[in-house]
């Protein structure tokens, strides 16, 4: 919608740009994205990989869908971890739950696409919803990735899946 009707690849539709706290949700589109993730997780389960050894995550819209898949209701599975790089909470009623999936959320301080305010707002909402294990990182960058961010993400994934102790901090 924000592209004047031109179709672009994405998990769901965007109605507002940049994506600030008042951005409207595409509840149906996010739901389709979550269904896609759940289907992939079921396929991995069928191959013998338990859900508690799977990390869901993504960048921007992918991070938003991962957050919805991990914290979007009482019936979502508990994954090994969830990673959101420059993502946001959508729909806004994604609230987490006690004992929920551990979270890694990194964001660029100068992000002009998914505004930096989204990270603090989302983490606060998830904490209020009962998510206890949150690793939060901020980088001096825009809507992009950084080698230090990817290293911190790799350490989070290692700890989440294998329980390895690293210098990356606590979950």
Image (spheres, helix red, strand yellow):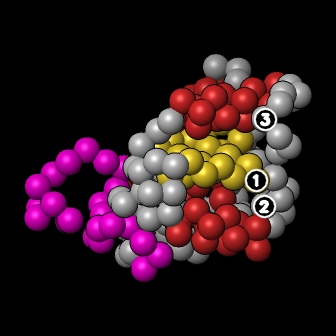
What residue sits right under mark 3 in the picture?
Answer: 168
**Disc 1 packing (10 Å; few <14; some 14–19; many ≥20):** some
Q: Residue 46: x and y, percent? A: 64, 25
Q: Which mark is residue 38?
A: none
Distance in Å between CA atoms under marks 2 and 1: 7 Å
SS state under label 2: loop
Residue annotated with mark 2: 131
Which residue shows up at 20% across the image and 65% down it? 1
Is the Cβ of the residue at disc 1 closer than 8 Å to that at disc 3?
no
Mark sitting earlier along the chain (1/3): 1
Residue located at (62% from left, 44% from top): 83
Is residue 63 in view? Answer: no
> Against 62, is 97 above or below?
below
Vertical arrangement, residue 95 with respect to residue 50, above or below: below
Q: Nearer the viewer, mark 2 or mark 1?
A: 1
The C terminus sits in image quarter: top right
Which secondary structure lies at badge 3? loop
Q: Quadrant of residue 93?
A: bottom right
Which mark is nearer the camera, 1 or 3? Answer: 3
Give the extent of the magenta segment: 1-22
């Amino acid at each position: 919608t924000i592209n004047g009707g031109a179709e672009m690849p994405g998990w769901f539709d965007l109605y507002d740009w940049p994506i600030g706290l008042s951005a409207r949700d595409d509840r149906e589109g996010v739901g389709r994205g979550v269904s896609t993730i759940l289907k992939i997780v079921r396929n991995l389960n069928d191959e013998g990989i338990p859900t508690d050894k799977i990390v869901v995550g993504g960048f921007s819209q992918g991070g938003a869908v991962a957050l919805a898949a991990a914290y979007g209701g009482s019936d979502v599975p508990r994954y090994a971890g969830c990673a959101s790089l420059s993502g946001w909470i959508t729909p806004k009623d994604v609230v987490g739950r006690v004992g929920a999936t551990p979270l890694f959320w990194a964001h660029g301080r100068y992000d002009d696409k998914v505004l930096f305010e989204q990270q603090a707002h989302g983490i606060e909402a998830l904490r209020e919803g009962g998510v206890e294990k949150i690793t939060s990182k901020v980088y001096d960058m825009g809507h992009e990735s950084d080698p230090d961010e990817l290293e911190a993400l790799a350490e989070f994934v290692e700890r989440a899946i294998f329980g390895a102790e690293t210098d990356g901090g606590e979950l």
